[in-house]
Image (spheres, grey):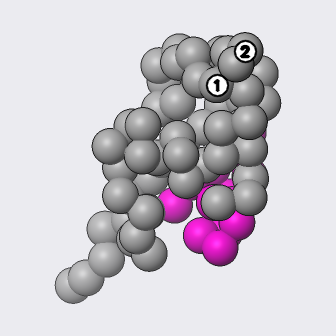
Amino acid sequence: MAEIKIIANGLELAVPHGTTLSKLLDMMEEPVRPDIMVEVNRKFIHLKQYSTTTVNEGDNVEVIALDIGG
């Protein structure tokens, strides 16, 4: 399968074409959970869309852990 290059949290990664955000998080050893937000090209993606949203060549992905609490 062909690979594409993306930027994830500032690092260049080569991932298989068709990689979903869920799979990318798994590859990055980041659990899918409600206090994690994912931004692709400065657009936040809803948790329910992680399994259907694929990354494309040149995408910039940021995984943000929210600091929830008081």
Residue 12: image location, x then y, percent: 53, 15
In the visual, does 69 lie left or right of 3? left
Residue at x 52% of width, y 30% of height: 8
- In the displayed structure, 2 sits above or below 27; it is above
Kindly state the secondary structure of the residue where label 1 is placed: strand
In the visual, does 58 lie left or right of 21? right
Residue at x 39% of width, y 37% of height: 28
- Of all residues, the one furthest to the front in this rendering is 1
| CA gap, disc 1 and disc 2 | 6 Å
Which stretch is magenta?
Answer: 37-50
- Of all residues, the one furthest to the bottom in this rendering is 70
Q: Which residue is disc 2 drawn over?
A: 2
Three-letter amino acid code at the position of disc 1: Pro
Residue at x 53% of width, y 46% of height: 23
Does residue 36 show up magenta in the picture? Answer: no
* Residue 21 shows up from this direction: yes
Quarter location, residue 46: bottom right
- Of all residues, the one furthest to the left in this rendering is 70
Between 34 and 31, the one lying in front of the other is 31
Whether label 1 touches label 2, CB < 8 Å: yes
* Residue 58 shows up from this direction: no
Does residue 44 show up magenta in the picture? Answer: yes
Residue 60: image location, x then y, percent: 66, 31
Residue 9: image location, x then y, percent: 47, 32
Residue 61: image location, x then y, percent: 60, 37
The residue carrying pointer 2 sits among few (fewer than 14), some (14 to 19) or many (20 or more) residues within 10 Å by Cα, namely: few
**Picture quarter with the N terminus:** top right
Between 21 and 70, the one lying in front of the other is 21
- In the displayed structure, 28 sits above or below 32; it is above
Three-letter amino acid code at the position of disc 2: Ala
Q: Which residue is disc 1 drawn over?
A: 16
